[in-house]
Amino acid sequence: MGGPCRPEATAARRFIATRRQSMGGRRAAFFTVFSNVFSAVLSIIPAAAFAMVAGLCTAVRVTFGVAFRVAFAVAFRAALKTASIDAVRVALTLALAIGFLAGAPGSAFAGGAVANTPGLHPAVPMPPGSARGANGGIPGFHAAPAVPSYASGTTAGGPVRTQPARMPFYVATRGNLTIYLLGTLHVGDPADYPPGQPFRPQILAALAASPILALELSPDDLLVSQDDVSKYGVCKRPCLPGLLPDPLWQKLEARMRGNPEALAEIRKMRPWLASLLVETYDSLSAGLQTEYGTEAQLQNVFLRWKGRRIVGLETLAEQMRAFTNLSLAQQREMLAQDLAQTPAQNVSDVQTLLHLWRVGDADAISAWESARTEKLSHDARVAASVDNRIVYERNRRFVSRMQQYVAPNKPLFVAVGALHLGGPRGVLQLLRQRGFNVDPG
């Protein structure tokens, strides 16, 4: 599946977003100094003062948004490696305090809210009857926990939709097993998540009914993913020009010429990660934002309920291998597809994908993307092998893990990239082959 609409590696996308934020203005300075400052705080802060520091960190968090969340996670992990026992105790207390003040449960904050979840938001109204356990017409629905206290974090400056996007949403049932499936976009438009109701009532009810939320990667894996992406995707010296045919490198260099900082970064990337960087820039040029990916919005709701668990359908190592095991020819094919069109044409395709996602038909999304890949492919055989590795093999792994997590009368809510769901080798069809009845939600 070609170009900026290809299903992406969650860890690599987060790595790219982090690197992009670190390139500019106050965020660059924040990334540079935060680790040292935080380590120093750990060495001198008395336990009794943690609340004051937590409040300060929360204020900084509001100012710097995602930059704070990522930098905090990296600095916190590094500081614990060298800290004394007393400092570790204080650090853990501090993390829990910040988690409380930021509106995230302690364990969830340490494991993933710091990576993906915006701050405090207004209450999310649940579907009629859901708080009393009514089924709302959704198979497998059972008594819901308390209503969450915040919604999606939408802070768009422009008009906001009065209704949430439809989104591809399906219900798979087999006997007393129920799997809810939501097709996501890892970058999104704030307008698709209205304050007070970021998702349709059917989706909110299904989320409330599910004790487990399954994402492509668990928040814990996503939290520590930066080192792995850097290890496997970034060279110590500029390597990309030597890994690409001259015409392809020249085309990429011309594409990035207006962004010298990004061009300097991309010179050190292996082709597969460079491809994802180009795709990410096209998505951002289409007006989408990493902070408003569907998964982050789901966690805003889900993490407020007690006794819930977020799991991954693949490990970080498995996701990384899907890309690092690509041959050089396959990596070049990925990048060639990204550069086959002008940036404006790629932006138009991203907007088309966003429109299809809002319509909510996974098979229509799959058919459109297959036709697009066929048009952009440089080598059809190599392109097909790329799709098999980064889409279809992962689809099979996703479905196997779903069956491990779902239990009788305990629905599982699954959220994966929308391009994984539809088509003859998509997740929905694989579930049908395993005896599930799959219907639109």
Image (cartoon, helix red, strand yellow):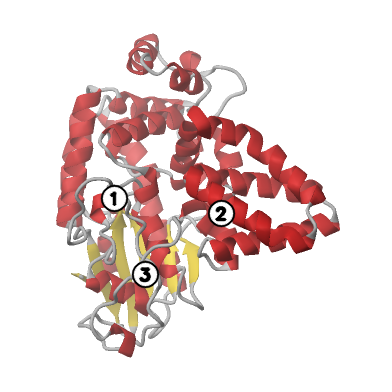
Report, in whole angstroms, how far the alpha carbon at label 2 lies from the one at label 3. Answer: 30 Å
Say if residue 128 shows up in the picture. yes
Marks 1/2: CA–CA distance: 22 Å
Going 19% across and 27% down the picture, which residue do you hit? 345
Q: Which residue is mark 2?
A: 58
The amino acid type of the residue labelled 1 equals: Pro
Picture quadrant where residue 337 is located: top left
Quadrant of the rendered structure where residue 8 is?
top left
At mark 1, the secondary structure is helix
Answer whether residue 11 is visible to the viewer in this image.
no
Depicted 313 relative to depicted 317: above or below:
below
Do the numbered discs 1 and 3 sit on residues whose CB atoms are within 8 Å? no
Question: Residue at coordinates 41% horizontally, 83% vertically from top-left?
Answer: 145
Left or right: 387 as drawn, with respect to 316: left
110 left or right, relative to 80: left
Marker disc for residue 190: 1
Residue 433's spot in the image, x, y percent? 27, 67
Task: Give SS at disc 2.
Answer: helix
Q: Residues within 10 Å of mark 2 (few under 14, many from 20)?
A: many
For the residue pair 175 and 411, the one nearer the viewer reads as 411
Whole-angstrom CA distance, mark 1 to mark 3, is 22 Å
- Amino acid on which disc 2 is placed: Thr
Q: Nearer the viewer, mark 1 or mark 3?
A: 1
First in sequence, mark 1 or 2: give its number: 2
To which residue does mark 3 refer? 413
Q: Quadrant of the C terminus?
A: bottom left
Q: Callout 3, which amino acid? A: Phe
Q: From the viewer's perspective, is residue 129 above or below residue 44?
A: below
In percent of the image, x 45 and y 75: which residue is there? 305
